[in-house]
Structures are given as C-alpha cells and as structure tokens.
Image (cartoon, grey):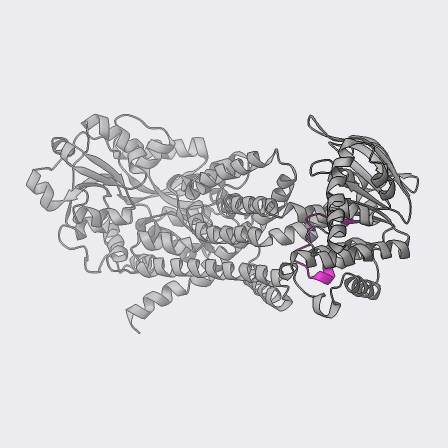
Amino acid sequence: MIEVRDLTRRFGDTLAVDAVSFDVDRGEVLVLVGASGCGKTTTLKMLNRLVEPSAGCVRIDGCDTRELDAAVLRRRIGYGFQQVGLFPHWDVAENVAITPKLLGWSRARIDARVDALLEMVRLPPAEFRSRDPATLSGGQRQRVGLARALAAEPALLLLDEPFGALDPITRDHLQRELLDVRDRLDLCVVFSTHDMSEALLVGDRIAVLDAGRLVRVAPPRDLLADPGDARVERLLETPRRQMERIEALSR
Amino acid sequence: MSAWHEGWAEQLALLPDYGRAHLRLSLLALACGAGVAIPLGVAVSRRARLEPWVLSLAGVVQTIPSLALLALMVPLLSALGLQGIGFLPAWVALTLYSILPMLSNTVTGLAGVDPAVVEAARGVGMTGRQSLLRVELPLALPVVVAGVRTAAVWVVGTATLATPVGATSLGNFIFAGLQTRNTRAVIVGSVAAAALALVLDALVRRIESGLRLRRARRWGSAVAALGLLAAVAFVGAGGPERGGAGAAAPDAPVVIGAKAFTEQYVLAALLAETIEEQTGAPTRRVDSLGSTVAFDALRSGAIDVYVDYSGTIWATILGGRGRPPSRAELLEQVRQGLSERHGIAVAAALGFENTYALAMTGGRAQALGIRTISDLVRHSRTLSMGADYEFFSRAEWKALQPRYGLAFREQRSMDPALMYPALVEGAVDVISAFSTDGRIAAYGLRLLEDDAGVIPPYDAIVLVGARLQRERPDVVRALAALDGRIDEAQMQRMNAAVDEQGRAPAAVAHDFLAGAASTAPAVAGPGGT
C-alpha cells in the first residue's frame, strides 16, 4: 500500500529524518516509536506532504506522491494531529464533516457518516453533534480528531500520538476500536507514539526511531524476543518492568 | 419666528447636502481602503519577509498629519495631471489614511490564528485558498473588523478636513462656523460627524458579531442598513461631485471659490448673487479653501472665480520682493503678471484694501506709547505675538521682521477667529490682523502704522479663470461692474454683521447689493475707519 524509500528531511543544518525506508500493507498497523524529537512527527507529515521531503520518495499504491496535487492527496489520507487542531469556529459535526464536504459528498451521506463516527468514538451524536470544540475536554477533542481523520473513509490513516490525552479506559477502548476499524475497512495505519507499551499493544510491526534514523522494524513478538540494539532494549525496559510488577502482584 | 430658531433652521437646511457629500467621501474611501488593505494584508501575511516593509510604509503614511496629507494631495495630483482640487484629492488621501489600521489588523489577525488549526486545515485537504477563506479569515475576523471600525471612525472624523482642499463635507459647517463665529454651524457639523462615526462603527460591529455568531438576521440587517446609507449618499447625487475642470459645457455652473474667512464667504455670496442676477448663469460655491489651494484651483480650472488680494498675489505668486511699489503700480503688475503667466484675468478691483497689519488693544498701545511698528520694536522683546497659521511663513513677515528687527518674547500661531479674544484677554499682546475685520472696531483695536512701508497694498481683486473668460464674457462683464463698488468701511460693516451679529454671509451680501448696507446703522462701535 505505502512504500517509503530513503525519506530525508533537513531543517537548516539538522537532519530531522535520515534516509528512512519501510513498507506498510493494507490491514496492517505500523507504529513509529521513539523519544520526543526522534523524527516521528516529521516522518508522518512527509507521508501526506504536510512537510515536503528533502530527499527520498513515498509511493502510495505504486503512485509517487510528488506527482499528485497535495490537497487532493491529503483528502485521501486520514490524519490525526497530536494537538488535534479542531476548527474552533465550527461545531463538532462540521469538524468531522470537512473532508467529505471538500470531496463533494451528499448532505445525507455526510450526516449519516458523522453520526456513525461519533458513535464509534463514544460521543453520542444527539449530545455532541452541535457542541462547540471549546466546551470539550482534552480527551473528547482527541476523539473528535480521530473521527475527523476517518471521515472520508481513507485507505491510509496517519495518527500522530492520537491517544495521549485520554484516560486509560477510553484509550483502551479506542485502541481496540481502531484495530476493529482497521480489520473491517482493511485500513493501512501508521501510528506514532513515545509509549512502547502502546506500541506493543497496537502495532502489527514496530519501527523504532532514534535521532532521525530507523533503528529496527519488527513485529512486537520478535522485538521482545530479540531487541538487537541497546536503544531498543532501553525502550522495552519500562513495559517489561510494569508487566513483571503486575504479574508479581497478581500472584 | 425667533432668530434662535431661524439660526438653527438655517444650518440644518445645509445638513442633507453636506451630510451626503461627507458620507459619499467616507464610504468610498473606506471601501477602497478595505479593498486594498485586506488583500494586501493577506498577501503580506503569506510572505513574512515583506511584512515589516509594508507595515512601516503604511505607518509612515499614518504619521503624516491628516490635514497635511490632504493638502499634499493637491500639488501631487496636479503634478500627475489629475484634478488637484475637490473630491479626488480628499478621496485619495482618506483612502491612504484608512489603509494602516485595516492592513495591520489583517496581518495581526491572521498571525494570531493557532498554527495547529492552520496545519489541520491543510491536513484535512484544504487548498491554500480554502484554508484562508474557510478557516484563517473567519478566525481572524474579529481582529480585522476591529481595524475596519478604527478606520471608519478615523475616516469619518478626518473627512471633515476635506473642506480646505475643495471637497464638500461636514467640515464645511466647522470651517465656516469657526471663521464666522457661528457656534451653531460648528455644533451641527461636529455632532453630525460624531453621529455618523458612531453609526458606521455600530453597523460594522453588528456585521462582525452576526458573522461570528452566524446569525444571518443580525448581519443581514446591518448590511441592509449600510446599503441604505450608501443609497442615501449616492443615489441622485450624479456621481461624485466634480470641479469646474470637468464641466466644459457653456451652461455649466460658474464655480465660485472662497478661502476660509468671513470676508471671503461674504464676497463669494456677493459674486454669486451678482452673476445669477445679471446673467442668469447658475453658480456653485466651493468654500473654505486653503489660501494657496484657491489660486491653484483657479489655475487648474477647478474653480472659475474668487477674490484674492493684490499684495498676496504679488508676494506669493509673482515672487515680488523688497519694497513694494505704490498701490496702483502694484495692481498693474499683478494684472499683467497673472494674465501673461497664468492666463488669469483681474475682472475688478472691488475698491477696498484688506491689508495685513499688526494690531494691539487701544489701551495697551496707549500705555506703551506705541503708534507705529517702529515704536513696537522697542518693546517687542517683552511682548507676545499671535498670528494666523500662515502669517509667520508669509513673505510679509519675512520682509517685516528683518526690516524692523522685530523679536518677540513668544510667537504663537492660532485660528484667526481666536486671535481677537486672545488679544483682548491679554494672552497675547500683538496680533496679525486684517484691516477690514469688523472686530478691529468692535474690540477697539489700534492698527500699527507700517512706517517703513514694508507691507504691500492689498486691493481686493476678482480673479477670473481661463474658461470663464473664453465662454462667458457676459459673466466677466457683470463682475467688472463691481469695480470700485465696496469701500473699506462697508466691508468692515459687512464682516461685523457676520462676526458680531451672527448674520448669514449670503444675507449680508444680499442686503449690500440691494443697497441696504450703505444705509444700515453702523454696528462696529466707535472708531470704524
């Protein structure tokens, strides 16, 4: 579905992303994981050209993204922002409906789609459709942001730390919901997080980034069995320790 | 019918004309200013490098005092071959003046939109244009509109200063009212301008809040009200007013100019009545022109006729220097010089002189033993001098000052209407006065003799532009018949009738032509010359 080759981005003298390559298939979730500043967000933004690559290329279904109009490209790709960025002058339903509207969907189709998405992210439409973004909690905003990203039924979904502000229960629900949607729609998902536990739970494969370089790409099981690199090992320490403690407590 | 009521009715009758002209000028300047400023603000906000340049340029325009900006348009537009007097310079200056608040607020408003939201707009697939129109501008709207409101209030206020460059506005009330000490006119003009500013401000604010809260009725009604105002201003107006330059038809009105003081209003009314009575030609008045603006207006054809003074023309237009020639000789030089160099004819010398003179209160002059300017020199270092705005930069002062060696403790420029009270109250000791001013007699002032003969003679002369000479010889003949008709005492009485009794200049002029002025009782008090 998506092929990334030697993707590179310079900001002045600093190399934010350094020759990153990976593929993601339909129905697969790839998690980009790494500490803050490792280049996760820049990598994601280059996939839909919110940031133009300095070098390298991205192909979606075999088509080089540089050959498409950027706006047209982005309408086909769902994007969930770390800071959400809801449009403050529009209500929840209008925020969710924007990409379908840009694509010229019918009013009825948009309305039905908005209701279905709000149900999915557990914001009952009757209550939330016409709410102002300013009146929502941080978690509710992230859920609207996720609904907005999914609105135009994209085949490719890019999520930049989408569940950061959520309470654990909602977070768990949405993680499972995301996997469910992925299965139903055969979505290709690229998901970034700094939380290795989340990466292990959500990812079909995990791509570990460090200082703009791709250190390792592997399924969670392989990664746990053989980190293969000190930096990966360090990232795995926290979830391991937490798991051991929980196990010890439940004995 | 009380005089009190009549005085107000007289002013209020002018309100529709002046108000509509003011509204036309303000609305057109604001609309064009917004049409330039908002797109420019958008363009600038997309190119960060341009921003400081454009904002400082607009800021520089803003720091030019508004009156100066208006006055600068006159020679500037004339140099470009455009009409330098009337609607055009006022409109251009006000448009420039309105740009800064709208431009800087557009830039500030767009810069204040949360970058995360702008990125989200791109992320959901909006083009740059869609992001601008659907997200950035709507979010910047309150700030942009605040700029429009500031501009609206500025423009409506500043448009009152359009009068001296020949554009009719509510300033006509204020300028004429200040000069003729007609408080009612000043009040009507000021209140109307303030009310107009408030109404525009409220309407723009209502449009903004209606758009922001998405209440179609709210902003719709405000837009409708604004449309109604525009309709009132423009419908039936025959487009923006034009000066005489565009009016080439032989039956076009004769445009009569007047500078901004009482005598000029009276004489302009007198010329108008004479022309209409004698030739049937319609006339139009352009009042309260700046002193040199009036001459430029005549030369460019924006006005057809006005009254100036021989010494002024000699010194400021023909470049006369040194000791002036005799009264008759100077008049002849002016007649020739204007005709040869500017194609302007002197149709008549009205018969009186209105000379620049230095004046003191009778009591103070007596106490100090001052009769001539030479006497004044001995005391000048302890005295304070007040003069109208132009006096200290006029050729007369530049001749007087070194010739006598005048050096005052203090020199103050002020409005001519306020000079006399300032002198009587002792705020200043000496003023520049006009010899025909009715207030000289009314306040019992002494005019100091120019014993060195530095100040030239100032015959009041009727100047006629090229178009009128060519197309309406009958009008020129009618004006020529005024030659020698008014003496100094008569002019002083007419001025006093306006300044002291609060009568309308047109009524005073009418009485004079009807022969009433010569038999009317002198109101000037003791010592009328």
- Residue that lies at the very extreme toward the bottom in this rendered image: B1
> Residue B443's spot in the image, x, y percent?
17, 51
Give coordinates of residue B461: x percent, y percent. 34, 42
Q: Position of residue B7 (x, y in %)?
A: 32, 65
Return the residue nearer the eye: B367 or B48.
B48
Marks counted in the figure total 0
Q: Quick one: which residue is furthest to the front in this view?
A: A251
Work out whether A173 lies above or below B289.
below
Looking at the picture, tell me which residue is in the foreground, B59 or B449.
Answer: B59
Kindly report the secondary structure that dominates the magenta region of the rendered protein.
loop
Please state, as top left, top right, bottom left or bottom right, where the N terminus of chain B lies in the image. bottom left
Q: Residue B413, located in which quarter of the rendered image?
A: top left
Whether residue B475 can be seen here:
no
Q: Quadrant of residue A68?
A: top right
Residue B97 percent coordinates (x, y): 50, 44
Answer with left or right where residue B451 lies relative to residue A60: left
Outermost residue toward the right? A62
Residue toward you, B125 or A187:
A187
Q: Residue at x 45, y 34 (%)?
A: B342
Magenta stretch in the rendered image = A79-95
Q: Is residue A108 visible?
A: yes
Q: In the rendered structure, does residue B459 fall within the stretch colored magenta?
A: no
Residue at 23% x, 29% y: name it.
B401
